Amino acid sequence: MAHAYTPGLRVSEMTVLRKDRRLPIKGDVLVNVGDVVTSDTVVANTFLPGNVQLINVASKLGIPPQDLPPIMQKGEGDTIKRGEPLATTKGLFGMFKSNVPSPCDGTFESVSTVTGQVILREPPTPIEIDAYVDGRVVDVFENEGVAVEVTGTFIQGIFGVGGEKTGLLTIRTDDPGRPLTADDIRDDDAGRIIVGGSHVTWEGLQRAMEVGAHGVVVGGFDDPDLKKLLGKDLGVAITGHENVTTTLVLTEGFGEIAMAHGTFELLKKRDGRKASINGATQIRAGVIRPEIVIPIEEAQKSDEIAVAEQGTGLDIGSSIRAIRAPYFGRLGEVTGLPNELQKMESESMVRVLKVKFADGEEALLPRANVEMIER
Amino acid sequence: MSENGKIRAIVATDCGSTTTKAILIKQVDGEYRLIVRGEAPTTVEAPFEDVTRGVLNAIREVEELSGHEVLAGEDVIHPNEGGKGVDLYLSTSSAGGGLQMMVAGVVKSMTAESAERAALGAGSIVMDVLASNDGRLPHEQIERIRHLRPDMILLSGGIDGGTITHVVELAQVIAAADPKPRLGIGYQLPVIYAGNIDAKEEVGRLLGEKTALYQVENLRPVLERENLGPARDKIHDLFMEHVMAQAPGYDKLMGWTDAPIMPTPGAVGSIIETIAKQQDIEVVGVDIGGATTDVFSVFKDTFNRTVSANLGMSYSVSNVLAEAGIENVMRWVPFGLPELEVRNRIKNKMIRPTTVPQALEDLKLEQAIAREALRLAFEQHKSFAVGLKGVQQERTISDAFSQSSSGATLVNLMDLDLIVGSGGVLSHAPRRQQAAMMLADAFLPEGITRLAVDSIFMMPQLGVLAEVHEKAATEVFEKDCLIHLGTLIAPVGTAQEGKPCLTVEATLPDGTALNEEIPFGDMRVYPMSVDDKIRVKMTPARGFELGAGPGKPHEATVSGGVVGLMIDTRGRPFTLPTEESQRVEKLERWAKAFDAYPG
């Protein structure tokens, strides 16, 4: 039997996930292995070295750089306050002295007798890393961070905008094929993660942002609306750092595409639960996809843990979605996996599969143009 | 390694980000020829984390397909004896994102530009160019260095004996940023200093402890001359020692190869340079990938390479639309599509980069995007491949009326002899005619130009081979790597549609006499196979030229290819009608002349 692999996105009702929470530079880890944490627990913190300021003291005083050392008021490692003199000239008979004040608070790093420049470093900026998900610390990376383990539902989206957010999952459409509009969003959706169906309209997303929703999860979104949201055309799919109040996660793609039935039903089942979402997407080597993590309390795990995860093999009977024109977005079932290369309308020679769409129509599709979906 | 004369079997691999490709070359009847090609997924990332796994798998496929034993267990058999083993094993690599550098120089258009040329020529992606006059404040430059985390920094600035202040200031900026390398926690970032010789000591004092500092000869010792060789060589050495050594399995791979592993684009540049030198021709090469487009050129014996880091056909496809504008993409599409549909389709290609065009319409849209990606990449290349700026030029009285400023582009389309295209959208176009049309539309060659595509993208392997065995590399390049599409004749000038443009006289290979007056605005193709060569007499109409001067007749020997002899009287500069029905009529007429699409 021909067996093909197609990179599908993970949709798992119950799984164990490990989330590494690392500092960008070394610092202090604040929790221990075994600690139970919630999404907002600070697990590690550190100080980022402050910004550097270069001031050309020699040119400001109008003297050669090599004349600087005797008139410097501060030495390497000294702390300095904004406005304090860095260097003061001797003046004429002790009069008419001129000086260069420090433009910031910080530490005096160095002075160069070649360029006449003084380097000051501003005070360090504190940064904190939180746990992002409710779970348990299972590993500590000394001075770097921790690994948090969480058991629950895990859904990967295809594309997202905005960073990590948490909130109560709230279903606002009754059907995975119906778009999410402004009328669906309520005033009390502040802080929530709203789930819609096939699409979110521009007005719908704006309304979600106005009320202060933390996230929107839908099937699709239109590219012209993405341009409006970002204020520019997105050239390369590296997202997650946008300054948006509401994180957007698309489960299917661009345009109006019904959310996969299974994904929608699973989200519906988790309606009202706390979820952590992240819109960060990177589509290059080391792919990052947006995600929705819904932790499940200990008591309920035993009943539900047996649910199997989606497989990765494509076989006769597999449910698929076409992901490129002319069948884009249509759902069907694999009815054949011929081995030979076949010529497409475009005359490209490719490996194909036979598919029967939900409406009974049959077609040959390049294997590269389908994605497996859960039933 | 054996001596050149005794080399009979060669294996070369290219470890890409996703696929490792191996080729076997053997000496057959005194000539070096490609025997087979094998490929396997690259294994740099988890769960394997050992590049040699993918290399061994790719070589095993070569063994299976050719029956030639190359491996004994997990070792490459050296040398080739009794039909087993190879005399040379070489490799290139772009796995792990290739080589990513920052460069710095005092004046943006002078030493900083020379430093950028050195880094690009060595096969690097240049993440940013710092210069004393780049308009950024020092703290902004420092922020940038800390944020980007390059693999390496090349610092230049000042001519030998000139002022040292500015280059020392740049060294201060780098020292203050206290940069950390992208890969490998716990080792120092390599910094190459190739600036004013008098600043060496001060730069050493500033950067010696904070970075792994290497000092080489000044890359711009005097304004009139670049000396990029020493900096380029040092980049290659450090790529091996620092960047590659951090990637899993490379220490083992480095032990197998008979020459240093080269960054993939550096190797492609090397083969293009070799071919240009050997055949004494002016060449443009382009490699359009999923994420980036590399353009290489050799004009007036000067090699240039540019990387358009965000112009590509999958990961970066959306950026082509953003940079070119939807109107420029859609001008190549001979049917209407609503903007919303085009935008959503392109974004869906970006988020699912491995899909292929199934419908003919979709293929045409993809090839329209490719034309714009190639055009933009070539525009960038033209503005970078320039003569040295800031150089005083000696002029005689005869030059007084045709003065050109320093820093003019070296790219002269009329002198260009050969365009070589590679990358999926060109190499795997369902019909070769489509590749020819894409190259013609994107590069708009002038005069007489040969067009070719790289059949299976083996230029990287041939590039590294050219470094150690030029003969083998060039023989395989000509015979097995290139697919000659044919020769394109394109007069420069414009006229009204249908007015006289060019008269061609020749005897075609099948004996038919060709004597045609071709009006302005046309595309024609005359079948001529790869081995055919004919003499053509071309007489441009008034206002047109083909290299001999306006309206002057020109005679040349042209060679054929899988497409044939192509004549393009669409004019230079080239414009497409803005009126929808006229534009569509033209696109369809030209495509029909080329038999580019079915139906």
Image (cartoon, coloured by chain):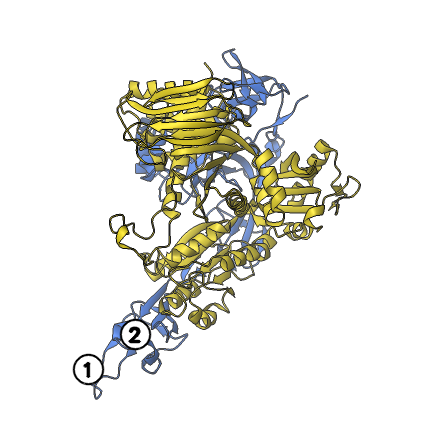
**Cα–Cα gap, marks 2 and 1:** 17 Å
Amino acid type, callout 2: Ala
Estimate how packed mark 2 is, as few (under 14), some (14 to 19) or many (20 or more) residues with alpha carbons within 10 Å.
many
Chain A: drawing colour: blue
Q: Which mark is residue B236?
A: none
In this rendering, would B352 be left or right of B546? right
Residue B478 image offset from top left, x and y in percent: 57, 36
Q: Nearer the viewer, mark 2 or mark 1?
A: 2
Q: Is residue A97 above or below residue B538?
A: below
Q: Residue furthest top?
A: A360
Q: Chain of mark 1?
A: A
In this rendering, would B66 be left or right of B426? right
SS at circle 1: loop
SS at circle 2: helix
Amino acid type, callout 1: Phe
Residue A350 image offset from top left, x and y in percent: 57, 23
Q: Which residue is under mark 1? A: A96
Q: Which residue is under mark 2? A: A58
Q: Nearer the viewer, residue A356 or B428?
A: B428
Number of disc labels: 2
Q: Residue furthest right?
A: B82
Which chain does yellow denote in the image?
A: B
Residue B408 image offset from top left, x and y in percent: 33, 48
User: Is the C terminus of chain B in the top left, top right, bottom left or bottom right quadrant?
Assistant: top left
Give whichever of discs 2 and 1 has the lower sequence position.
Answer: 2
